[in-house]
Image (spheres, grey):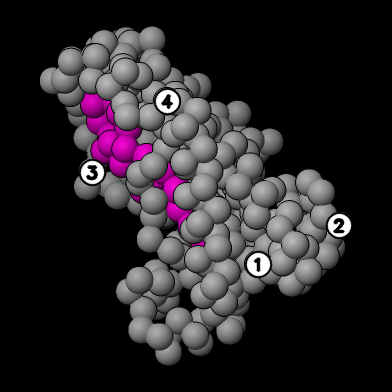
Amino acid sequence: MVPEVRYHLLRPEQIVARRKECPVVYIPIGTIEWHGVHNPTGADTLQAEGLALLCAQQGGGLVFPPLYYGESRVEALMEANARDRDLIAKEMDLPPDNFAPERQPFTATEQAIHYHKLLLHILAEAESLGFEVGVLVAGHYPLIDHARAAVLQFNQREYSKRSGMLAWAFVDYLLVRDRYDCAGDHAAGWETSHVLALHPETVALELLPPKGAPLVGVGGRMAPQDATPEFGQETLQAAAEVAIQEVLHRLTHKGMYRGHGNGLREGLWKAEV
């Protein structure tokens, strides 16, 4: 039986028992964004949550509720920045100007700073709840840079340097890109396979045009028409296995990851395998 690892669905005694067994918390972060006519708009966050659940179920720990909001709405967003953003707006029956910077209450820089502060706040919340390692799991690829910046700043606090929670961040495709030449895309075969594996009821491949025809807001080396739930499960499992090794090594060797820049070191566990 697969254990329930979602923090918000557990009672206090269940949380305490699982946290004492493995004091790690995974925090999925993503967005709401166009992912083709065939995928749900929450695809990024759904992937992050699914991968976080897989890590906690197989390696221990708990999973916080996913974060869909707060990221920039004017930078690194398909509706705002894609070359075919006008076509995306047309498919969504929205005016393209809805995503213009002047429609936002904050500038791009202000939005980035707000999101950075939000991630720091969430990590501090996780620390207050007794976790020793907090992991930001980025589903929307641009968020890995924000997550890493938050990790570095969080780990550099005086309390963190001595005994605080150790933070880390990862995105699936960077962990396995040496194994898959199609690792990482936008709504193409890689991501679509993940969503098929996690939430098949939300995907409609039949809405795609014939293979080779132009696609709106889709890009990658593997055609979305070739996506399968089996490939999605395989690649999610591959990423989870690496992530678990990284997390457990941090849990037992915290000193190796403290100090300037060390929070982002990866692969140290391989020397012990």
Dot 3 crowding, Cα within 10 Å, few <14, some 14–19, many 20+: some
Q: Nearer the viewer, mark 4 or mark 1?
A: 4
Q: Earlier in the sequence, mark 3 or mark 4?
A: 4
What amino acid is labelled 1 in the image? Met
Secondary-structure class at tag 4: loop
Secondary-structure class at tag 2: helix
Q: Nearer the viewer, mark 1 or mark 3?
A: 1
Looking at the rendered structure, which numbered label has been put on residue 271?
Answer: 2
Q: Earlier in the sequence, mark 2 or mark 4?
A: 4
| Residue 246 spot, x, y in % from top left | 69, 58
Dot 1 crowding, Cα within 10 Å, few <14, some 14–19, many 20+: many
Q: Earlier in the sequence, mark 1 or mark 2?
A: 1
Q: Residue at x 86, y 57 (%)?
A: 271
In the displayed structure, would residue 30 be above or below residue 10? above
Q: Residue at x 59, y 83 (%)?
A: 21
Q: Which one is in front, 216 or 33? A: 33
Q: Nearer the viewer, mark 3 or mark 4?
A: 4
Q: Which residue is mark 1?
A: 165
What amino acid is labelled 4 in the image? Thr
Looking at the rendered structure, which numbered label has been put on residue 202?
Answer: 3
Dot 4 crowding, Cα within 10 Å, few <14, some 14–19, many 20+: some
Secondary-structure class at tag 1: loop
Q: Which one is in front, 48 or 264? A: 264
Let me know if residue 193 appears in the view: no
3D distance between C-alphas at marks 1 and 2: 24 Å
In which quadrant of the rendered image does the C terminus lie? Answer: bottom right
Looking at the rendered structure, which numbered label has been put on residue 107?
Answer: 4
What amino acid is labelled 2 in the image? Ala
Secondary-structure class at tag 3: helix
Q: Earlier in the sequence, mark 2 or mark 3?
A: 3
Residue 16 horizontal side relative to residue 223, left or right: right
